[in-house]
Amino acid sequence: MAAKAGVELGGWSAGPSWGDYDHDGRLDLFVPGYGKFDPDNPQSGNFQGIKVSCGPLGIAGEHGHFFHNNGNGTFTDMSMKAGVSDSKGYYGLASTFVDVDDHGWVDLLVANDSSPNCLYRNRHDGTFKMPAIFPVSQ
């Protein structure tokens, strides 16, 4: 079903959210990428000096995935074009679409695990700008 809809992913993802970022009346999908995990070849991570079976620290982060709803049961991957692919590969844990400045357009907030959180501001043209990275609290 995911392959047919165009939203099939590899890797390990968590905390998806739905929002109409372009005012076309259809809900679009963002899925934060968490990590690159292969159960057939598990990587060991290191957490505070203790080896663990998975990270996040010690495994490679996964990029975020943003899908535009085509209105016919399929989606188009717009991650790179929209500017929300997370080129640093943070450990995406949860996301939400929210209008942070009350301008009528939803922005995208991504909470990451053990890496900075990100706020992507909607530019009203199908793209986002990341003006803010919130550091990890100690």
Image (spheres, rainbow, N blue to C red):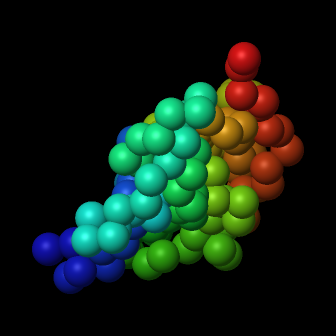
Q: Quick check: 7 left or right of 133?
A: left
Q: Residue at x 59, y 29 (%)?
A: 48
Residue closest to the eye, 48 or 29: 48
Quadrant location, the C terminus = top right
Splitting the image into 4 quarters, where does residue 6 fall? bottom left
Residue closest to the eye, 69 or 131: 131
Residue closest to the eye, 13 or 7: 13
In the depicted structure, whether residue 39 falls above or below residue 33: below
Quadrant location, the N terminus = bottom left
| Residue 30 picture location, percent across and down | 46, 55
**Residue 92, can we see it?**
no
Q: Quick check: 5 left or right of 48?
A: left
Q: Which residue is drawn at 74% across and 46% down?
A: 121
| Residue 84 picture location, percent across and down | 65, 60
Residue closest to the eye, 103 or 57: 57
Q: Residue furthest top?
A: 138
**Residue 48, can we see it?**
yes
In the depicted structure, whether residue 16 falls above or below residue 71: above
Q: Residue furthest left?
A: 1
Q: Residue at x 33, y 70 (%)?
A: 41
Q: Which residue lies furthest to the right in this view?
A: 131
Q: Quick check: 51 left or right of 74?
A: right
In the depicted structure, whether residue 35 falls above or below residue 93: below
Q: Quick check: 96 left or right of 101?
A: left
